[in-house]
Amino acid sequence: MESLSEGIVEDILIRLPEDSLMCCKCVSKQWLNLISKPHFVKLHLKKSKAKEQCKLIIVSPPDPCFSLKYIEKYTAWVEDYEFYGPINLDEDKVVRTLGSCDGLLLLFTSDREMFLWNPTTQQVKKVPGGSIRRTGYHRELSGIDYYCCGYFPLYGFGYDESTDDYKVVSHGNKTNKKMNNLKSEVYVYTLRKDSWRVVKTKFPCLSYGSEKPGVLVDGILHWTVCPHERSCYSTSIVSFDLRSEEFRGISPPKFETGMKACEVGILGGHLCTLQYYDNSYVDVWAMKDYGIVESWTKLFRFKDHRDRGISRLKLLQILRNGDILLVRNSTDLVMYDSQRQRQKSVNNMDFFFYGDVETYVKSLVSLEAENGLKRKANRSKKISSKKR
């Protein structure tokens, strides 16, 4: 192998799975440097995303245990194993996922701590100043205290291609303890700088109704919100572009009388809405041409014939045979045939209330802040030169 050029070695290594590449890093310093190069990591990630496999990562509280499940684009499980996460929690503590992007998970604990984690490389990074206190909707972030008036703060996680950086977004309504002088504030954490900053942008409304993390579609995060403070239902959609760092509203598809709630999701790369009605069915729509209101297309109507009322759904993926993989009520993994309107429970995942399921792709993306490492290296050089 020593006689081979770096280009040939790269062409061989790029075909290996992530776990094998982690072992290959120990072969030589040359291989370690090659596999760690941003160009190699991005190219390998692109190939991983193109594979005909659906991967699900599952958080099963109260233990910080994660299940990684692989499913072919048909219906059969091909691999299923469990592993423990990077966070040591007491029995009464839980961990949630606030998003998954390029093999990285954003985790949030009931201790009000936030972490970024790559399960493949086992790298973990604590996000500084990311704590929340639910009491009175009081919240701390980067040393700034404010009260979140209305409902819950919004969170999102994704990749900004324009800066080649990963970002965590947090939005809340700032006010004083007397709950007056309401003001919208947005904070953005960037991995490279490893810090939060205030973003001056106008939020489309001051009231929002869900603590669910933002849905990432092509570098843009999405949430459903209440259109005004008197509304009890989330019927409007807002988006946050990670590139321009600006909010804007998105018109949802028209809904029928009797709609109780609306949520956003992603399916086949398209932004979707799930419209919940009180007579036990959910309409699922997809925006086929992003940003074009007229491109909203009704995909299917999910009917639930159980006596427990309407199910809460999370869209996961369209399989090759056309079936739609989704999670029902955070407990059942369901294959849904939208043509025949039939559903098949794949298995019961035995979740607690805080159980989370995310689509997942293995990757070698590093959590090391490059700028921070360079600053430390430069500082070390200066110190050593002074000693001389």
Image: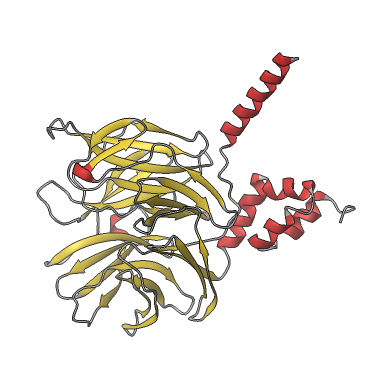
The residue lying at 86 percent from left, 54 percent from top is 4
Which image quadrant for residue 148?
top left
User: Quick one: which residue is furthest to the left in this view?
Assistant: 230
Q: Residue 142: image x %, image y %?
A: 37, 32
Q: Looking at the image, is 177 positioned above or below residue 285?
A: above
**Colour setting:** secondary structure
Which is more toward the observer, 331 or 283? 331
User: Quick one: which residue is furthest to the front in this view?
Assistant: 91
Q: Residue 247: image x %, image y %?
A: 31, 41
Q: Looking at the image, is 114 positioned above or below residue 22?
A: above
Judge whether residue 204 can be spotted in this image: no
Q: Residue 261: image x %, image y %?
A: 19, 62
Does residue 176 appear to the left or right of 201 in the view shown?
A: left
The residue lying at 30 percent from left, 41 percent from top is 171
Which is more toward the observer, 183 or 11? 183
What quarter of the picture does the C terminus occupy?
A: top right
Judge whether residue 140 can be spotted in this image: yes
Q: Residue 216: image x %, image y %?
A: 40, 53
Which image quadrant for residue 146?
top left
The residue lying at 48 percent from left, 48 percent from top is 116
What quarter of the picture does the N terminus occupy?
A: bottom right
Q: How many marks?
A: 0
Does residue 303 appear to the left or right of 243 in the view shown?
A: left
Which is more toward the observer, 136 or 41? 136
